[in-house]
Amino acid sequence: MADNAATGEKERKPFLDRFFGLSENKTNAGREILAGTTTFLAMAYVLAVNPIILGDQGDLGELGMPMQAVFTATAVAAVVGTLVMGLWAKYPIALAPGMGLNAFFAYTVVLTMGIPWEVALTGTLLSGVVFFVLAVTGIREYIVNAIPMQMKLAVGAGVGMFIAFIGMKNAGIVVADDATFVALGDFREPTTLLALFGLLITVVFLVLGWKGGVLYGIAITAIVGMATGVVGLPGGFLALPGGLDQTFGQAVIHLPEAFTSQMIIVVLTMLFVDFFDTSGTLIAVANQADLLDKQGRLPRAGRAMGSDSVATMAGAIIGTSTTTAYVESTAGVAAGGRTGLTAVSTAGWFAIAAFFYPVFEVIAGAGEVTAPALIVVGILMARSMGNIEWEHLEYAVPAFLTVIAMPLTYSISNGIALGLLFYPVVMIAKGRWREVHFVTYILAVLFLGYFAFLH
């Protein structure tokens, strides 16, 4: 009798409760939607920042991607990826084109290596395919364990330093100098002053614990810029999403051009960064939401990683760089999000935002407005340096080389390659060669060839 009553009670639960397991996770639809809104506010800055990074034309001009297409692709990729995560993996985690990976795409692959952005999109697609295979076959755990934790921490911190450097460059805080390579910019320039103002208020918002601090900082900086005439006014507020006719399907069309030694390095780097960035983000968000099992493992890990790889493949076909899980999802978790309904709510907001390109166009076109966001994101990513065991030189040397090489060589892949080249060498010198996974030795040899190829 009790069983029948329990069954009846289960059947009477609303569809959303049954599908997402709201009651089981001690949450409700209203709380989940609020959490999804919070996550969106915390990461919506990507709609302004991603177009300016992927749309960077470089010194030669005409190299970057069309900005409106990138904006629309960013919003659509976020919707697709986040919906897959919410409906399939059922985690309160949002996805969008990743910071760091978009910088690698634009500044290393396109502007430095001279690879057309269409072919770079193909590389992104291939990295997503490989990622998917690794996720569904279980090889992911094997590779994750092969790369030393100290190097994973260094890669995250190095990418943060690189992004912050780009932000300072866009703000005019750092400028080129013939004698010293770089120098302090002119703080009397209106654009630089605006960027410094934006950095100040953004930092204040974050220190106060405002979940959407980065987005609020961008918005206020843009408003002040428009009021003072430093930034132009938008031509409107609403517009139908457009531009995808310029990017959609390019990754597939240019597939034959991607099978070169140069592109192999590109695909491996995209895969490497996305692989560990996603792993770290999933664990961090799930741990905060108390969703890990008693052994500290992530339930439905295959689906979660698979969602990320599907999002990357979809994003590449649509027309943007690698789509990955966002650590800003922790903002939604802090607001009570525990299930995939949080992610679905976030996806809904990205779908609405896709119709506001005229506003984001002005913001994305003003480097001084988005520069503070880049600097702050860099600061947040660089926090992983605190977990590096600096007292052990066998860790400190490769970690430091990884971190410092990314901004100084203007290349994420150079930093990764240099660090993983030195790591096994110093471990051998320390007499700890048995602790180095054989996969790491293979990577060191490959990266040695990489530097020979660059030369």
Image (spheres, rainbow, N blue to C red):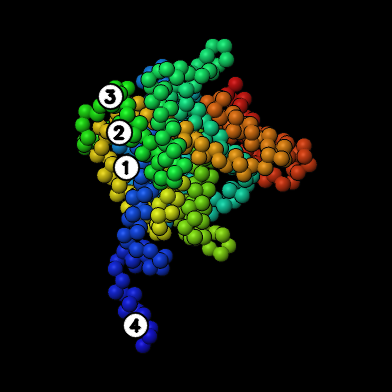
Mark toward the viewer: 4 or 2:
2
Mark toward the viewer: 1 or 3:
3
| Residue at position x 45%, y 50% in the image | 330
- Looking at the image, tell me whether mark 2 or mark 1 is earlier in sequence order: 1
Q: CA distance from mark 2 to mark 1?
A: 15 Å
Q: Quadrant of residue 213?
A: top left
Q: Is residue 339 visible?
A: yes
Q: Is residue 46 visible?
A: no
Mark toward the viewer: 4 or 3:
3
Side (left or right) of 397 relative to 236: right
Mark toward the viewer: 2 or 3:
3
- Mark 2 is surrounded, within 10 Å at the Cα level, by few (under 14), some (14 to 19) or many (20 or more) other residues, namely many
The residue that label 1 is drawn on is 76
The residue that label 2 is drawn on is 360
| Residue at position x 51%, y 60% in the image | 292
Q: CA distance from mark 2 to mark 3?
A: 12 Å
Kind of residue indicated by mark 2:
Phe
As drawn, the label of residue 232 is: 3
Kind of residue indicated by mark 1:
Val
Q: Secondary structure at mark 3?
A: loop
Mark toward the viewer: 4 or 1:
4
Mark 1 touches mark 3? (CB < 8 Å): no
- Looking at the image, tell me whether mark 4 or mark 1 is earlier in sequence order: 4
Q: Front-most of 112 and 12?
A: 12
Kind of residue indicated by mark 4:
Ala
Q: CA distance from mark 4 to mark 1?
A: 44 Å
